[in-house]
Image (tube, rainbow, N blue to C red):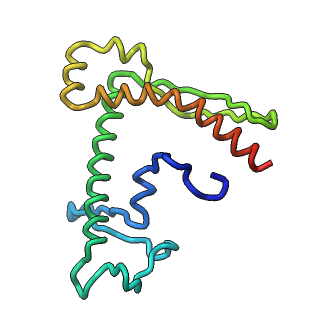
Amino acid sequence: TGAGFWLKYTYIPAYVRKYPFIFMEIPEQKQWVLCVDEAAPHFVDEDPAQPFFDGEKPQKICDEALKFCQHYQQQLDLTRHFTQALREQGLLRQEALQLSLPNKDSIRLEGFQVLDEEKYRNLPDAVVTDWFRRGFLPACDAVLLSYSNWKHLASLSRDTEGAAA
């Protein structure tokens, strides 16, 4: 919302939810390290109600953050494999979108790619079988279903601008 809060029942991206924690890779050691942004407004190292460490021992909040960041990294790796498979099959195409705003201005969004539904529906059987086993088919269907959200996003923009006026 314009007040800086998420709308009720809105999905909050995992990238946002993991903050102020983040994974950092140390490639030469093939290791990941859990880091925290100590400048984050909601990070208080001295908060007795929720300490990060008891001496040298990480507390529950660190364990939970570590598990969340590990899961996030696994999903990120899976997403990279998924998008690479889409590229290999030539299923991504450039798209642009024109949105009309209530004040009669318009916004042009471009430089993004979408899943080509026709090409997706005509994938070779061997690819469909492989993607079924890899869990890519539900992801493709979710992408296609998500396209109906463009109208919702446009209406949110109109509602937000109307409220601001």
Q: 101 or 152: nearer the eye?
A: 152
Query: Left or right: where does residue 110 sit relative to residue 44?
Result: right
Q: Name the spot of residue 10 as percent of width and height, x first.
A: 50, 46
Q: 81 or 157: nearer the eye?
A: 157
Query: Left or right: where does residue 112 sit relative to residue 53?
Result: right
Q: Is residue 29 above or below residue 119?
A: below
Q: Residue at x 60, y 33 (%)?
A: 110
Q: Is residue 119 above or below residue 138?
A: above
Q: Residue at x 26, y 49 (%)?
A: 74
Q: Quadrant of residue 153?
A: top right
Q: Name the spot of residue 28 as percent of width and height, x first.
A: 23, 63
Q: 40 or 125: nearer the eye?
A: 40
Q: Residue at x 24, y 88 (%)?
A: 55
Q: Is residue 33 above or below residue 105?
A: below
Q: Name the spot of residue 61 as percent of width and height, x first.
A: 31, 71
Q: Residue at x 49, y 46 (%)?
A: 9
Q: 143 or 81: nearer the eye?
A: 143
Q: Name the spot of residue 121 as percent of width and height, x first.
A: 35, 14
